[in-house]
Amino acid sequence: MLRDAPAILEMTPVSTAEEETLKLFEYDPLAPLDVELVTVAELNRYSIHEITYASPKGGRVPATLLVPNASSGPFAGIILMHGLPGDRTNNASFARGLVATGAVVLAMDAPFARPENRNRSSWPLTFDEVDRLEQIQLMIDLRRGVDLLVAREDVDPERLAYVGYSYGAAMGGLLAGIEPRIKAFGLMVGDGGLVSHFTAADGTPLTELNRLPQEQREDWLELMEPIEPIRFVSRAAPARLFFQNALRDEAVSKEDALAYQAAGSEPKQIEWYESSHFLPAEAFRHMANWLGTEVGIDASRFIGP
C-alpha cells in the first residue's frame, strides 16, 4: 500500500548564489512515480522486486527493491548507491544483508549505468556537460527514491538512511546537503566528488583529466565545481554522517578522504581501516551496527557481504 504523495520540502535559507545552485535539484514531488514491476522473486524471509520508476529528467530509473516478509513493520528504509563504474548489482549482497535486519532496501542505477547508456563507452564519464547533467539527474532520481520509500506503508518515514560506496559515498555528501528527510548517511571510501578525485590538493589535474585539452579541462571544472559534493556535505545536519575510509586506498587519497571528512557537519563518526579500496567485512558490520543505532534495524541479523 502507498501513502499520499509527500509535501513539497522547504529548504534552509541560503545565499542567493547557493539558492541558484540548489534550484538545480528541484523537481515536482507530486508527480506520479509511475513504478513498474519488472519481476518479483519471493524468498523465505524477503522478496526481491526488480522495478523501474520515472525520472523527472527523462527516462526510467532501474532499481531493485528488497522487502522483508515479516509483518512487524513499519521498517527502516535504506537507499544504496554503487560506485563508478558499476551498477546496482554491485550492492546485491549488501542489500540482502540489510533486508535481513528488518529494512526495506532500495538499490538503484546511476544515470550512466542505465541500459541505454552502458554502451556509450568503456568509461562512463564524458568530461563534458553530460557529467554535470547526469550528476544533477542522479540527485533528483535519489530524491524520487526517497519519495518511493516514504509512499510505502511498510516504511517508517522517520527512519530513512543512505549508504554509498566510493562514487556513491561522494554523491551521498551532495544528497545530504539537499535532502532533509534522510536521517543517516553512511559514506564508505568516498572523497569530495569528481573534481576532488581528478585533481590534486593544489588543483593540479590528474590522470584522465590531465589528458584533456586545456580548454575542455577548464570547461569541465567550471561545470562541475558548483555541484561538487564536498561543498554540500557541511549542510547535512541534523542528519548523522559515518565516514569509513581505508589507509591503503589506491583510489581515494588520504588527503582527499581527510578533506571530505573535515567538511562534513556534526554529528559525524569516522573510522579508518587497514585495507585497500575494498573494505573488509568488518567495515560492513560496523556500518550495520551504526544503522542499528541511527534508524533502528536489528544489526544482530545482518549477513555481511
Image (tube, rainbow, N blue to C red):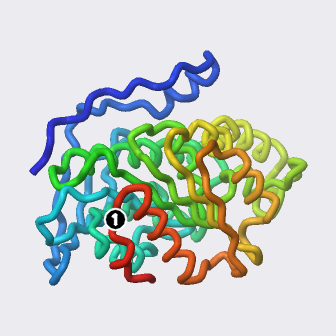
Quadrant where the image shows the C terminus: bottom left
- Under mark 1, the amino acid is Ile
- Quarter of the image for residue 177 reads top right
Q: Where residue 19 sits: x, y (%)?
A: 56, 22
Q: Where residue 159 sits: x, y (%)?
A: 34, 51
Horizontal arrangement in the rendering, residue 69 relative to residue 113 (left or right) = left
User: 225 or 293, which is in the foreground?
Assistant: 293
User: 72 or 278, which is in the foreground?
Assistant: 72
Horizontal arrangement in the rendering, residue 49 relative to residue 123 (left or right) = left
Location of mark 1 (residue) = 297
Q: Residue at x 23, y 62 (%)?
A: 51
User: 20 or 96, which is in the foreground?
Assistant: 96
Q: Residue at x 76, y 51 (%)?
A: 259
Circle 1 crowding by C-alpha within 10 Å: few under 14, some 14–19, many from 20? many
Q: Residue at x 35, y 60 (%)?
A: 296
Q: Where residue 22 sits: x, y (%)?
A: 53, 29
Q: Residue at x 62, y 60 (%)?
A: 243
